[in-house]
Structure formats: C-alpha cells, structure tokens
C-alpha cells in the first residue's frame, strides 16, 4: 500500500513540475521591434527595442542578447540589468552593429531572474536594405515609386524605396544612417516634433541627404528649413517654364504643360550643402499626378542625383562600416606592451629540461633520495613558472593600459563624427569596467571574430547616462576590445584657401581645431602634400608642384608578404590604411596623439591615443575661372570585363578580352567642362581604345597614340549620371597588361 502512495506522490510531482517550470519560463512576455520600422543596413548601427510585460511578481534580473545555445560560435551575450514590477510593461533597447545581428542569426533575448530563465524570444529575421535606401515621408503613397516599387537595377546602382510614418522617425541622428535619402513632402503642420527637426538637421550634417518638396498646398515641414534653403514664404501658382526638367531628363516632350509649384519665383530645384550632407528642395509636389507617372521620372531623378552630388554621398556612406576591423587591429598594438620573444621562452624551458631537471635528478640519486623527485621536480617547475611571471611581467607590461584609435571626420565648425576602437589590457585579468560617453553608441567586440560581439560583455548606464561596459573573468594578460561611434562638438575645423594652377597647388591651410597636429597634409588622390606639424591657430603657406600622376602604382603586396615584416612596418601599414581610407576628392588630414577620450577604464591605467582628423577641401577657381581636379583624384566607379581578363598586382591582363571602365566624372564638386585622359602613354598603345558617345548611344574608336581631351563635345559623351565609359580591348592571343586609366577634370562652380 505504501508503494502505491509513493507512486502517487511521484506522479503528482512529475505532472506539476513541468507546469510550474513552464510558468516560470513564461513569467515575462517579450516583443521585439527594430528602429526605423525595420530598415537596417549591414554596415550601420541599429537598435533593438524590447517590450517586456511581467505576468508575475516584481523582480530585478538580467536581460541578455545573444546567439542560440549550441551555436557555432557559442553564446555571445550582451546583457543589461533590469527591474520590473508586478504586471508592469516597460521598454529597453540594445544598440548593435547590423553585421553583429547577422553573426548572431538566429539571435535570442533571454530574461533571467536569479540565474533562471523567466522569458525568452527569438529575434525577428532581419531584412537588410539592398542598395541605396530612399525613405519617403508623405501623406500620399505615390512619391518616388518610379525609382523602385521594390528594387530596380540601373547601371549597377540599386535603389530601395521605403515608406515611413512620422511616429517611426527616431530621436537620435545615428539611426538615420540606415537610410541614404529622406524625402519629406505633404505633411501637415507640427507633424514632426521640434526634437525630430533638430535630429534631422544633425543627420544631414553627418552626411545625410534630405529632400523637401512642396506644391501649391505647401508643406508643414518646409518652414523649419526655409532659412537654410533660402525659400521663404511661398506664393503657390502654376509654373509653365519647365526647361530645367527638359534639360535634366534629356526629354523635350513632357507629359504636362505646367506644374503647380510652391513659389514660381524660385527655380524648380534648389540645393544647399550642410556639413557633410545636402538639403535639396523640389519646388513642386513629386507625388502629384499626372506628372508623378511620367515615364521618364527615373531618368530625371538619376540626373538630379548626379548634378547635385547625391550619388557622391551614397558612395561615401556605403564605404563606412559600424565595426572597422582596421581600427581594431591597430588598437591591439598597445604601445606599452612588448610581446616576449618566443626564443627566450624556449631557451628558459630548454635550460630547465636539459640542465636543471637532470641535475636535480642526479643530485637526488647521489643522496639516495630518488623518490623525492616526484615532489621536487614539479615544485621546481612551478617555482620556475612563478619566477618567469614575476621577473618577466614588467618586461611585457608594467601596468594596466589601454590604446584608443579615433577617426574624426569634421563636418563643420561645430560638429565632427567620431569612430573609436579601443583595446584594454588588465595585467592581472579578473573583472573591470569601461565607461563611455552618453552620446556614443558602444559595444564590446571580439578580436577573434572579425568584429563580432564578444562573450560576457554587459552594458549598463550610470546616473549621468554614461554607458558602462563590464568584462568578467578576463584571463591574465588578455586584451578586451570595444568600438564606439558618435558625434563630438567643440573640436573645431581646418580652414583652407587653395587653388590649382599650372600644375601647382597654392594657398593657405589653417588649423582652427582645438588640438595641435603632429602631422598635417593635403591628400589629392595618390598625391600627398606634407605641411608638417601645426599648432592650434597656425596657418601654413602652400605652394607645391603636383606630379603628373598618370599611372597607378603597382601593388607589390604579394612580394612584400613573402618576407617577414617587422612589427613597426605592420603598424605603419595599418596607420596608413586608416589615414588614407580611400575617400574620394581632396582632403586635409591631421594626425596626433592627444587625449580624446570616448571610452575609459574604470581603474588606474595608462591611456594611449592615435587620432586621425579628416576634412573635405573645396578648391577655389584658378585665374581662368576653372577648378581643376588633377590626375588620380577621382576614381573609377565600376569595371566590366568580357573574355579572358584577370586583375593582379595592380594591372589588368587581357588576352582575347576587354575591360570597360566607368570614370566618375560626376564626383567632381563642380560642373565639368573638360576631361583629359593620357592615352599617349606607352602602356596604352597596344590596346584598341573606344569611348561611349552617350548622346548617340554608340561606341567610337579612338586614336591609339594620342591623348584624349573632351571639352566642346563633353556633354555628348557623359551618361545621364554624368560619367564617361572607356573600353580597352585586346583581340590577340598574346596577354597584354595595363593599369587603370587616370583622368583630370576641369570645371566651374555650380
């Protein structure tokens, strides 16, 4: 009878226990949303917004973001402390790079109370934006449909059009970097808050493109930007002068004879640069019919994007990454830390194994105490290890230390965008915290996962809204890393008055930042004009000869990698890659080691800094009235190959094949009037050379041994996006090699 009683008790326990466990696991209900309505770029930061509802008692615990248990990389966790009352619903957010979300796929959120899981939610599948994102904020649904209902490919450029609602607009400018263009039209007054307007203006200064448009009914958002655009109060009317649209689209016949405009006294299109970004005003309602359905609207807006340098900002945005692996690799090379020579370690242990251990054994044998060897030899090994640690540690690093690498892109006198990679070394390991500025987005990363999120990194916020990273159970002499992104004010800017005339660059450059520069130079494509050190407020006179940089340098990296590089060479290569990050145009670059703290260890330590300041230079016209961008300053936008073609060591090798180069003439920040290509150089002679005459829609063969100069007929050859197409062919069975062609552009101010 007792057996049956115990069986009944066991049955009740087995039945009730899973129910109570399941109840505990479902105590907190979770729902997940992504900022900006789910628009995420792989290369940018995003925000995971978590809504929690507690169906049980109040508690304090942790919420963790990480991978599925048993995932290939283990469970990478970013955690936050949280408190929630009984029956309470509250929100919190995780800020992460888009690429980290993909690395976690599938990602999970877990709520833990006293170490036990009380809530769990799988992250929704992330739909990464494909191509350049045009987000539309409009009362209608027809605006910019001609660019893409979904995605349309035009000359290698893809556009994705996304519809937004005002309530989805974030209150932080960094989130807008997941879109390239925001088009705002028919919205009533006070649709956007004052803070949203401030954030939009900051995003534009950071490189965003804001398109405002208004027809005869006006726009509630336009007045907030009227002073920057010089628009003022409108005078709605019909505009019959539409030659600007005809010229841009290349079509003489339009679908309408007139357009309702906001102000007939103003041009149909007005653009103003703001920091690194652009404000563009269309003086008519882009979404209004019947013109919204005109079949050539796509051609019109491709030309507008080219003329007003929107495309240039697309490419600049697409070249930036939330987690820069080059910055992280450089920050690992902490100046105080000296890596021990492997030969020294081998020598010490060789002496122990070959000399000390046998001598100990021989001595014990002489004393007839060989059994002591079981204790003395291991103890001596431990003592040797401790001795190596005590004596050798100061030779590696004498104190806790950190190395911060900052890239500072100056937008204007008031604002600069900063990206930071930091490495922290706690000599004794254990637990330590890192505090970052509240205006910066910060995340721990792993040096083993190409910038993936690190394991066991927790994120908190202190009473001043500073973000606090916590690293637990760090092994002895181990480096931990983090990356951050944000804006700083009060840095100042450079000032330049430069012009290029008769193959010389002349003028002045002033350091109006608050920091001294150890190095300051002008970068023009592959050319660098060194200006030396510059104190705050110092002005440098510039008068330097520009080399005829016709040919690209060959890449001898394969030969270089065959020999062992020194640590100094490797570090200098990383620094050079960061300072010369491939951005287009003419820039001022300053380098120093001043303390510009974004993240700091919360314990006594030595901090080292290496900072790169970058600012775009606008050239002044020469005495001829023209602005010159010399050879090698503007890039090749795209290449298309046919036949047997290979690219190696900086050269294109053709055998029964051809290469078509797209020359980015449209990237010049002025209206191009003349383009020169040095086809008279001997490396180009063996090839058949052709140029695409866009106006006629056909290819034309060029003289093999003469330079190409396009001036009077330049517009006939430029595509609707303002580019030139050049084709090189080798129809023989003998392989021929050539570098990418360089070109020079002259023009006038827009």
Image (cartoon, rainbow, N blue to C red):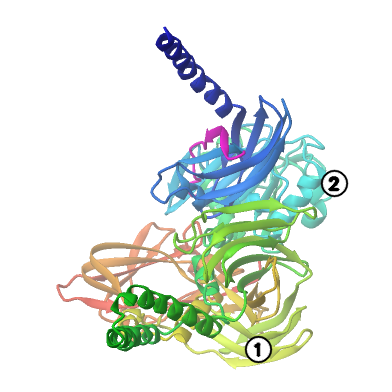
Q: Which residues are magenta?
A: 114-131
**Residue 593 image point, x, y percent:** 66, 81
Can the viewer see residue 247?
Answer: no
Which of label 1 and label 2 is nearer to you?
1
Quadrant of the rendered image containing residue 652: bottom left
Residue situated in front as seen by the camera: 217 or 113: 113
**Residue 127 image point, x, y percent:** 49, 41
Q: Looking at the image, do the residues carrying marks 1 and 2 touch, with CB atoms under 8 Å apart? A: no
Q: Residue at x 45, y 10 (%)?
A: 5
The image shows residue 32, relative to residue 392, as above or below, that is above
Quadrant of the rendered image containing residue 449: bottom left
Residue 125 colored magenta? yes
| Tag shown at residue 54 | none
Left or right of 485? Residue 516 is right
Mark 1 or 2, nearer chain start: 2
Q: Residue furthest right?
A: 233
Read off the residue under disc 1: 506
Identify the element where label 1 is drawn. Answer: strand
Left or right of 270? Residue 645 is left
Quadrant of the rendered image containing residue 3: top left
Q: Main secondary structure of the magenta part?
A: loop
Residue 94 colored magenta? no
Read off the residue under disc 2: 233
**Residue 426 image point, x, y percent:** 59, 70
């Amino acid at each position: 009878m007792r057996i049956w009683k115990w069986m009944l008790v066991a049955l009740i326990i087995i039945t009730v226990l899973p129910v109570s466990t399941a109840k505990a696991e479902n105590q907190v209900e979770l729902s997940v949303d992504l900022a900006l309505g789910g628009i995420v770029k792989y290369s940018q930061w995003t925000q995971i917004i978590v809504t929690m509802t507690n169906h049980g008692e109040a508690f304090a615990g942790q919420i963790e973001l990480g991978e599925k248990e048993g995932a290939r990389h283990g469970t990478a966790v970013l955690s936050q402390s949280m408190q929630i009352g009984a029956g309470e619903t509250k929100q919190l957010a995780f800020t992460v790079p888009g690429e980290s979300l993909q690395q976690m796929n599938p990602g999970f959120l877990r709520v833990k109370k006293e170490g036990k899981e009380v809530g769990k939610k799988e992250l929704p599948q992330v739909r990464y934006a494909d191509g350049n994102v045009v987000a539309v904020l409009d009362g209608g649904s027809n605006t910019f449909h001609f660019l893409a209902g979904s995605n349309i490919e035009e000359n290698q450029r893809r556009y994705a059009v996304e519809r937004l609602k005002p309530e989805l607009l974030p209150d932080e400018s960094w989130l807008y970097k997941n879109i390239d263009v925001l088009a705002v039209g028919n919205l009533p007054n006070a649709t956007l808050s004052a803070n949203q307007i401030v954030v939009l203006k900051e995003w534009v200064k950071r490189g965003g493109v804001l398109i405002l448009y208004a027809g005869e009914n006006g726009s509630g958002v336009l007045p907030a930007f009227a002073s920057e655009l010089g628009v003022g109060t409108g005078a709605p009317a019909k505009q019959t002068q539409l030659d600007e649209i005809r010229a841009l689209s290349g079509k003489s016949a339009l679908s309408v004879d007139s357009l309702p405009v906001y102000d007939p006294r103003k041009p149909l299109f007005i653009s103003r640069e703001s920091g690194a970004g652009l404000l563009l005003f269309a003086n008519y309602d882009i979404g209004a019919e019947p013109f919204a359905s005109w079949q050539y609207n796509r051609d019109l807006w491709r030309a507008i994007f080219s003329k007003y340098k929107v495309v240039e900002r697309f490419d600049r945005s697409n070249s930036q990454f939330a987690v820069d692996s080059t910055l992280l690799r450089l920050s690992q090379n902490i100046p105080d830390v000296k890596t021990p020579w492997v030969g020294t370690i081998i020598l010490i242990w060789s002496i122990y194994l070959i000399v000390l251990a046998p001598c100990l054994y021989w001595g014990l044998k002489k004393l007839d105490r060989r059994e002591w060897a079981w204790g003395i030899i291991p103890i001596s090994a431990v003592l040797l290890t401790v001795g190596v640690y005590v004596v050798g540690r100061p030779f590696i690093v004498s104190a806790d230390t950190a190395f911060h690498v900052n890239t500072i892109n100056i937008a204007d006198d008031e604002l600069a965008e900063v990206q930071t990679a930091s490495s922290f070394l706690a000599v004794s390991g254990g637990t330590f915290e890192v505090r970052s500025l509240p205006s910066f987005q910060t995340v721990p990363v792993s040096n083993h996962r190409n910038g993936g999120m690190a394991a066991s990194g927790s994120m908190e916020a202190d009473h001043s809204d500073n973000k606090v990273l916590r690293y637990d159970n760090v092994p002895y002499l181990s480096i931990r890393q983090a990356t951050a992104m944000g804006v700083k004010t009060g840095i100042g800017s450079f000032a330049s008055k430069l012009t290029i005339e008769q193959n010389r660059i002349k003028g002045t450059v002033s350091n109006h930042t608050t920091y001294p520069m150890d190095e300051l130079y002008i970068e023009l494509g592959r050319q660098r004009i060194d200006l030396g050190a510059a104190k705050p407020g110092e002005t440098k006179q510039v008068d330097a000869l520009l080399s005829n940089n016709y040919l690209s340098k060959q890449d001898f990296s394969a030969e270089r990698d065959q020999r062992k590089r020194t640590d100094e060479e490797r570090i200098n290569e990383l620094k050079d890659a960061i300072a010369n990050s491939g951005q287009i145009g003419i820039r001022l670059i300053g380098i120093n080691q001043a303390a510009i703290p974004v993240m700091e260890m919360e314990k006594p330590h030595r901090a080292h800094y290496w900072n790169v300041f970058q600012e775009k230079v606008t050239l002044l016209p020469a005495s001829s009235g023209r602005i010159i961008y010399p050879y090698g300053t503007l890039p090749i936008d795209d290449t298309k190959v046919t036949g047997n073609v290979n690219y190696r060591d900086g050269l294109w090798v053709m055998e029964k094949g051809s290469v078509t180069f797209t020359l980015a003439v449209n990237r010049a920040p002025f209206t191009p009037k003349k383009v020169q290509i040095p086809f008279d150089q001997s490396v180009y002679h063996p090839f058949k050379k052709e140029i695409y005459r866009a106006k006629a829609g056909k290819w034309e063969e060029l003289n093999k041994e003469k330079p190409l100069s396009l001036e009077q007929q330049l517009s006939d050859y430029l595509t609707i996006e303002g580019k030139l197409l050049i084709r090189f062919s080798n129809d023989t069975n003998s392989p021929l090699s050539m570098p990418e062609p360089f070109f020079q552009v002259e023009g006038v101010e827009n």
